[in-house]
Amino acid sequence: MNLADGVGMGTHVLAVVCGGFVGFSLALTGGGGSILAVPLLLYVVGMKDAHLAIGTSALAVAVNAYANLIPHARAGHVRWRSGIIFTVAGIGGALVGSELGKLVDGRHLIGLFAVLMIVVALLMLRPRKDNGETPSGNGVPYLTPRLLATGLGAGGMAGFFGIGGGFLIVPGLMLASRMEIIYAIGTSLFGVGSFGLTTALNYARSDLVDWPVAIEFILGGVVGGWLGAIGARHLSKTRGALNAIFSTMIIVVAIYMLARTLYPAALSNKHVPAQATIAPVTNVQPRSS
């Protein structure tokens, strides 16, 4: 049984609205938006299982990343050779990371996720700087080991937490292949989509993806991303202020998640079933619909 079974129209609307908010914020601020997908699914849409929220959000993040990859590819901002090398290694990392994530007890996983959110928010406050080098990483043999190592680490982190990992992939590509930031951003979307899809498929294997909610989240994200792109063009001069506001919001949500993790009874009107948030995922059998 998935979340959508036995609930009213409100749940479907919330999923679309939350997806729209993630897409809007991601397009408007240029990064970090997908980090809010898991807490929105847990605390707004109403999922009770941390692992189910991670698997569902990973699928939504993957589809949105592939969709955003298309305009970057058309503009020539994707360095395919470096991106493929990076992503192949990262897919292996995402497989291992997502498998480990399923074995970690849900409450601890959400606590670690909240800490990661704070790190992401602080990184967003740092201005992105171009490294001033040419995007020549495509044909340099000695860069391949660096791409493989960096991709493996970024994919492992993305798989463990069920995130896109763009905040890791962009600087990783710049460091490993010496490409300019505009090419790193475009190329990173191939990795974000591939890592998210790998994580989602691994979670789906354990029946930990709510497909109806994921589709609604994706649809909302497409519309929200379109509106955010329009807003970004009009608010380009205030991008630093937007990042500061958005980072502050992420930190506030992360603190709330930590509080819910440490003091669940005090911040909830009803106890969440222990098996939904605490028990690790082992030998999961498919749920009957």
Image (cartoon, rainbow, N blue to C red):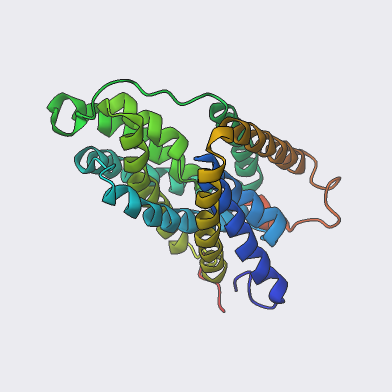
Residue 251 position by quadrant: top right
Q: Residue at x 50, y 24 (%)?
A: 127
Is 123 situated left or right of 107 in this image? left
66 and 241: which one is in front? 241
Which image quadrant: the C terminus? bottom right
Q: Residue at x 65, y 53 (%)?
A: 40
* Residue 206: % across, % down: 48, 62
Is 2 situated left or right of 71 in this image? right
* Residue 24: % across, % down: 57, 52
* Residue 247: % across, % down: 63, 34
Q: Residue at x 55, y 55 (%)?
A: 227
User: Does the image show residue 197?
Assistant: no
User: Does the image show residue 75?
Assistant: yes
Residue 175 position by quadrant: top left
* Residue 239: % across, % down: 56, 34
Is 232 situated left or right of 154 in this image? right
83 and 95: which one is in front? 83
Q: Going by the picture, which residue comes out furthest to the top?
A: 132
Q: Is residue 240 above or below residue 11?
A: above
Which image quadrant: the N terminus? bottom right
182 and 153: which one is in front? 182
Q: How many marks?
A: 0
